[in-house]
Image (spheres, rainbow, N blue to C red):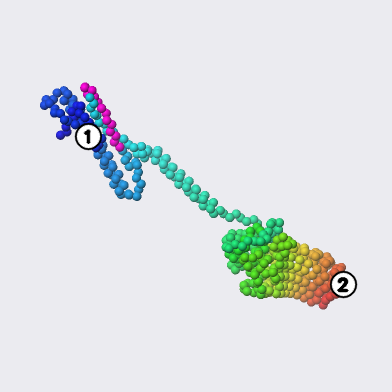
């Protein structure tokens, strides 16, 4: 049975923050008006206390549920909004007739701000939109980072045979300890000088040279350096003229990965940087060195070459048309090989050519008419082939010619009388052909017409 509080009794604080009224005086047996009023107030106070007790009980249950959730998931970080509701108790005081305080307890249940946000549909919609936007931004950032870390390679310009000699050459290339490019990157560069199908064909000289430059070469040279095509051409020539990898009689330091090509073998390769200011190959003499295989078109990349001697070998195939790119060539000697096909018309681009020897092969076709306009020629040796046609009267343009050897071919027609206009000629060998007619009056030291 609850004890009614007495007026003017001092308050004390309980564990639930509720002010209680002590009762030290006895009540009279017969209730009066004041007692009735006190009883009514006491009843109201009890009702308020019941409300507070109910709120405290509900809060305690919620706290227990929260503790159980935290024990079930110990790794989660504590969240401040677990207590979504709180009970606030406000002490309000009323005054009786004698102006004494009487406590009136009110308990209100309020929601936290976080709980209101999560119940707000607009807030949830904004939260979802924000999360999606952040995911999109992160994806775009990752994609952009991946593109910048691996940029695509730009296409190479169209190929040209002649190198730009006006560029500053590398006189003393540095040596690296490991390859600086991969095969795919260097192939795109070499497609400027060789056919793509040759670079992709298994065991082709071009493909072997590609892998040598990518995996073995240690001389650091830029692709745009005019010396780079020269190094590549010599590597291709090496692989193209010894298909068995051991036919060369003298290799010296050929294909040395740590030295410049001019230093591979001075008895074979000669460079003269004192004159040109660059390490261009000036002379290449591989005579009687056991060369076989074929002459690659990449030989035309040796733009600084002045003397090319490949005589007395067993080179087969045709004379590449790219030989016309050797505009500085003065001596061209391919005699005593097994070359077939025709003499390419591009040979007439060799305006400085003075010595031409293609004898002892199996060349067919006619003598190019443009050959007679090469007025710098001093010696022409086309004997021991299978050439046909006639000897043109335009041979009189060869004003510096002193030796003309056309023996052992299938040439026909008459010997042009214009040959008598050649003042410097001293050797004319035309035997074993099918010439007809009279012999012109010529003042020569050696004349064979049978």
Residue 268 lies, in percent from the top left, at: 69, 70
Residue 402 lies, in percent from the top left, at: 82, 70
Residue 28 lies, in percent from the top left, at: 12, 26
Q: In front here: 257 or 184?
A: 257
Q: Residue furthest left?
A: 29
Residue 425 visible from this viewpoint: yes
> What residue sits right under mark 2 in the picture?
442
Q: In front here: 54 or 90?
A: 90
- Assign the C terminus to one quadrant of the image: bottom right
- Which one is closest to the eye, mark 2 or mark 1? 1
Q: Determine which quarter of the picture holds residue 412.
A: bottom right
Residue under the image location 11 percent in, 25 percent down: 30
- Assign the N terminus to one quadrant of the image: top left
Q: Is residue 378 left or right of residue 106?
A: right
> What residue sits right under mark 1 in the picture?
50
Between the C-alphas of marks 2 and 1, the distance is 147 Å
Residue under the image location 59 percent in, 67 percent down: 202
Q: Determine which quarter of the picture holds residue 171.
A: bottom right
* Number of residues whose C-alpha sits closer than 10 Å to that of mark 1, classed few (under 14), some (14–19) or many (20 or more): few
* Number of residues whose C-alpha sits closer than 10 Å to that of mark 2, classed few (under 14), some (14–19) or many (20 or more): some
Q: Is residue 329 left or right of residue 128?
A: right
Of helix, strand and loop, which one carries label 1? helix
Q: Is residue 80 above or below residue 235?
A: above
Q: Which residues are magenta?
A: 86-99
2 or 1: tag closer to the N-terminus: 1
- Magenta-span inclusion, residue 389: no
Q: Determine which quarter of the picture holds residue 446.
A: bottom right
Residue 303 visible from this viewpoint: no
Q: In front here: 37 or 13?
A: 13
The answer to whether mark 2 and mark 1 are in CB contact below 8 A is no
């Amino acid at each position: 049975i609850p004890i009614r509080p007495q007026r003017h009794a001092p308050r004390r604080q309980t564990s639930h923050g509720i002010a209680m009224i002590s009762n030290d005086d006895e009540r009279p047996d017969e209730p009066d008006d004041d007692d009735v009023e006190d009883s009514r107030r006491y009843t109201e106070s009890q009702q308020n206390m019941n409300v507070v007790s109910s709120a405290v009980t509900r809060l305690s249950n919620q706290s227990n549920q929260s503790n159980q959730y935290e024990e079930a998931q110990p790794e989660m970080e504590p969240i401040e909004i677990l207590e979504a509701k709180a009970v606030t108790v406000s002490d309000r005081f009323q005054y009786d007739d004698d102006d004494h305080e009487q406590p009136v307890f009110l308990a209100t249940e309020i929601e936290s701000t976080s709980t209101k946000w999560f119940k707000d549909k607009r807030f949830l919609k904004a939260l979802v939109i924000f999360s999606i936007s952040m995911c999109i931004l992160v994806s775009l950032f990752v994609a952009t980072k991946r593109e910048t870390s691996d940029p695509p390679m730009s296409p190479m310009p169209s190929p040209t045979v002649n190198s730009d000699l006006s560029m500053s050459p590398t006189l003393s290339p540095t040596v690296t300890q490991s390859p600086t490019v991969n095969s795919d990157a260097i192939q795109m560069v070499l497609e400027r000088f060789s056919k793509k199908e040759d670079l992709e064909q298994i065991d082709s000289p071009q493909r072997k040279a590609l892998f040598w430059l990518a995996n073995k070469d240690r001389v650091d040279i830029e692709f745009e350096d005019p010396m780079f095509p020269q190094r590549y051409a010599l590597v291709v020539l090496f692989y193209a003229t010894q298909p068995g990898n051991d036919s060369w009689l003298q290799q010296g330091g050929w294909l040395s990965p740590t030295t410049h090509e001019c230093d591979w073998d001075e008895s074979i390769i000669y460079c003269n940087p004192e004159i040109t200011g660059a390490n261009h190959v000036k002379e290449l003499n591989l005579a009687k060195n056991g060369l076989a295989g074929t002459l690659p078109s990449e030989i035309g990349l040796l733009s600084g070459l002045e003397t090319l001697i490949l005589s007395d070998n067993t080179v087969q195939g045709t004379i590449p048309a790219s030989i016309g790119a050797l505009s500085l060539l003065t001596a061209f000697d391919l005699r005593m090989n097994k070359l077939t096909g025709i003499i390419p018309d591009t040979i007439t681009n060799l305006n400085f050519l003075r010595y031409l020897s293609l004898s002892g092969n199996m060349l067919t076709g006619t003598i190019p008419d443009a050959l007679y306009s090469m007025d710098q020629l001093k010696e022409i040796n086309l004997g021991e082939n299978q050439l046909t046609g006639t000897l043109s009267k335009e041979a009189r343009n060869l004003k510096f010619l002193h030796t003309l050897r056309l023996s052992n071919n299938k040439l026909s027609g008459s010997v042009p009388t214009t040959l008598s206009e050649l003042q410097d000629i001293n050797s004319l060998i035309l035997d074993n052909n099918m010439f007809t007619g009279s012999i012109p009056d010529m003042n020569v030291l050696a004349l064979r017409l049978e």
